[in-house]
Image (spheres, rainbow, N blue to C red):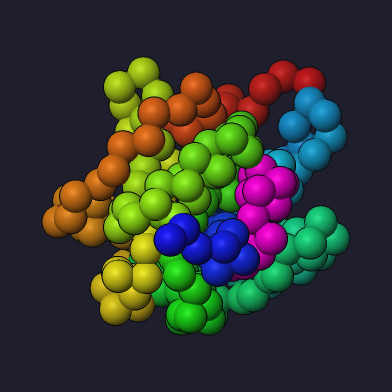
Amino acid sequence: MPGRLSDYQAILLAAGKGSRFDPLGLQNKLLQPLPDGCAVAVAAAASLLAITPRVLAVVRPDADQLRAELQAIGCDVVSCMHADDGMGATLAHAVRLSRHAAGWIVALADMPYLKPATIAALLDALRNGADIAAPAHGGRRGNPVAFSCLHLDELLQLSGDIGARRLLKDYPVQSVEVDDPGIHLDIDRPQDLPLH
């Protein structure tokens, strides 16, 4: 029997340093405006919020503006004191805070072009029995990734900057074909931002 949408937790990982975008750390790539004026992270969060009733965004302790902008659109925002330890530590922190969920959609805040339909398709895969599901477009896997509660213990043990990549190698991943090139598009460097 498929679970309710409210049983699942969306996680937005927004605690990276963004050092490839700005090695000096003067500009937070997640706050950069897109052509419509929306900040990168806010656009990424909005795709999740269009489908999931609960979005937990994880930010760095000093990210006051980012926290405020994500809270303003309805995200629950938490700080990760160990953000410098890498994405794995950040994800483990978020899963620990939502450990009673039936599963998680793990999205990256620097991916603002995801279609809400992709989030819905991944949730459908979880609700219909997938343990891990990832979207594919043009034969290539992308983000975000969905995990069922079967992987709770392993997600809680993540550390370092590899995130959950090891789980994708060690376990079967249900591929969900989507019409969404946004699953491959992130904002990594200034040239990745569209011209206004």
The single residue placed furthest to the left in the displayed view is: 170
Q: Does 45 appear in magenta?
A: yes
Q: Which one is in front, 14 or 56?
A: 56
Q: Position of residue 157 (x, y in %)?
A: 29, 77
Look at the picture and state if 99 lies above or below 139: below
Look at the picture and state if 84 lies above or below 29: below
**Which of the 4 image quarters holds residue 134?**
top left
Q: Quadrant of the N terminus?
A: bottom left
Q: Position of residue 40 (x, y in %)?
A: 68, 42
Q: Would residue 87 be found to the left or right of residue 150 on screen? A: right
Q: Position of residue 102 (x, y in %)?
A: 45, 70
Residue at image location 30% in from the left, 22% down from the top: 139
Q: Does 18 appear in magenta?
A: no
Residue at image location 80% in from the left, 39% down from the top: 38
Residue at image location 64% in from the left, 75% down from the top: 78
* Residue interval drawn in magenta: 44-59
The single residue placed furthest to the front in the displayed view is: 1
Residue at image location 55% in from the left, 68% down from the top: 7
Q: Would residue 96 be found to the left or right of residue 69 on screen? A: left
Q: Looking at the image, how many numbered discs can be counted on the residues?
A: 0
Q: Position of residue 77 (x, y in %)?
A: 68, 70
Q: Which one is in front, 19 or 193?
A: 193
Q: Is residue 194 visible?
A: yes
Look at the picture and state if 114 lies above or below 165: above
